[in-house]
Image: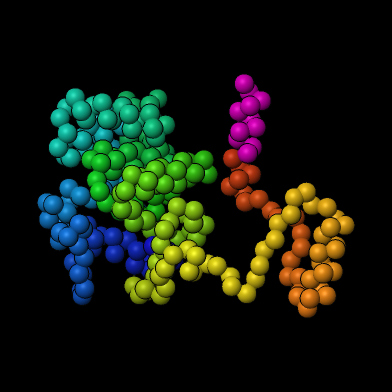
Amino acid sequence: MLGPNGSGKSTAFKIAVGLLRPSSGTVTINGHKPGTLSARKATGFLPEDSTLLPFLSARESLQLHGALAGLGRAAAARKADELLERMGLTDAARRRVKGFSKGMQRRLGVATVLMGDPDVFILDEPTSGLDPLGAVQMKELIAELRGKGKAILISSHLLGELENVCDRVAFINHGKLLSEGTLEELLREKDLHELRLSPPDPAAIRALESLAAEKGLRVVSSKAPMRTLEAFYLQMLKRDDGDKS
């Protein structure tokens, strides 16, 4: 679910989990009304703002959410340690949450949602506060959950960060649905065709451009493509890690 700040994304999510009542329309989670015990058991909700208890440690926070999800003490402790490692928080397991950075709190918040292994994940700005590497890991986690058959509803106002993990996209503004569909339906440019060549032989490229002109086609762009800043950032980290080793 995409849209600018104040478009209604967080409000829609709060309605879906039973924190707000809709002025019209209906919502069901696995066929159950929001706020009912069945709907709550089926749903994992990550709100936009942290709701972690600041006086608990990271491990205690996860064990608490495990208990709320119905896990026994041993099972909750075991799963808490697994998720602390998965989210890169093992070294901070005994630290109180109030000393965590925003990114660390976000990773811990995601781990609390995972404790109950719900069928439906509702994630409000899941990459907020994360560095580029953390954002990539978050997208990998979302793709993994999708592969397990989980239903995932994500909100974001950053258009590119979730493009590679979404099956369908809805764009809302002022509380209204403006457009909805698959990425193919929404983003494919029907009046353009992109051709990439490797290696970029100048003579071959000039010949192709001349052929296009002979056929009455206009060459809109002919240049070396740019990597994304995210790809460059990850490449630099990998190179730095390699130099250190």
Residue 233 falls left or right of residue 131: right
Vertically, is 162 above or below 208?
above
Counting from the top left corner in percent of width and height, residue 216 is at: 78, 78
Q: Is residue 38 left or right of residue 234?
A: left
Location of the N terminus by quadrant is: bottom left
Front residue of 153 and 172: 153
Farthest top residue? 245
Q: Is residue 236 left or right of residue 57?
A: right
| Majority secondary structure of magenta residues | helix
Q: Residue at x 33, y 44 (%)?
A: 148
Residue 101, compared with residue 208, is above or below; it is above
Q: Nearer the viewer, residue 201 or 113?
A: 201
Where's residue 59, x and y in %? 28, 29
In-image side of 173 versus 221 (left or right): left
Q: Residue at x 40, y 38 (%)?
A: 104
Q: Quadrant of residue 12?
A: bottom left
The region drawn magenta spans 235-245
Tell which residue pokes out farthest to the right in this image: 203
x, y percent for residue 151:
31, 53
The C terminus: image quadrant? top right
Q: How is the image coloured?
A: rainbow
- 224 relative to 61, above or below: below
Magenta includes 243? Answer: yes
Whether 225 is among the magenta residues is no
Q: Quadrant of residue 92?
A: top left
Q: Quadrant of residue 67?
A: top left
Image location (x, y in percent) of residue 166: 43, 56
Residue at the spot 20% in from the left edge and 28% down from the top edge: 75
Residue located at (20% from left, 57% from top):
30
